[in-house]
Image (cartoon, grey):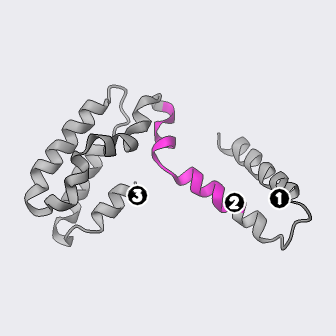
Amino acid sequence: MHLQRSILNKIRPRDKEEFANDLKAGFNNFDKDSSKEEVFKKLGRLVEKWSRAYGKLLYKLTDEEFILDYLTYIDYPIEVRRMIYTTNSIENLNRQIRKVTKTKVTFDKESKLLDLIFMVIKDFETNNW
């Protein structure tokens, strides 16, 4: 998501909607038959279509090693792909930890802070997984 957002921030407003649809199609691989090879084909078509206008911006999408980091979720079952793909749950957990620790001014020992964080994580795990 962050990669897509950073690319879209550099696209001209008149091209943004069409480009966003093409980019989303490249990374939206939540079908059972999705594979990394299919993603590379989709991204190849995207780069081919938009390289004239945004060639310098899209050069990273042609680098397989760079893109493989963003495709880790394809190696997992369909049920968990979206959880891996998006960072929303991680950001939500971090927000909850900050909310709980912000109200405490000091901790006597480091272990007390770690205990509190552990309890927040266990509660999060129970409610979200």
Decide: few, some or many residues near mark 1? Use Cα within 10 Å; few <14, some 14-19, many ≥20: some
Give me the residue at 50% from left, 42% from top.
Answer: 84
Residue type at mark 2: give it.
Gln
Numbered disc in front, either 3 or 2:
3
Q: Residue furthest bottom?
A: 105
Residue at 69% x, 60% y is: 96
Determine whether 11 is above or below 18 in the image. below
Find out whether residue 11 is within the magenta segment: no
For marks 1 and 3, the one nearer the N-term is 3
Residue indicated by mark 2: 96
Q: Residue furthest top?
A: 33
Q: Secondary structure at mark 1?
A: helix
Residue labelled with disc 1? 113
**Residue at the spot x=22%, y=62% of the render?**
17
**Residue bearing the label numbered 3:** 2
Give how far across and how far down residue 41 sits, in percent.
19, 37
Q: Is residue 122 left or right of residue 45?
A: right
Q: Main secondary structure of the magenta part?
A: helix
Span of residues in magenta:
79-97
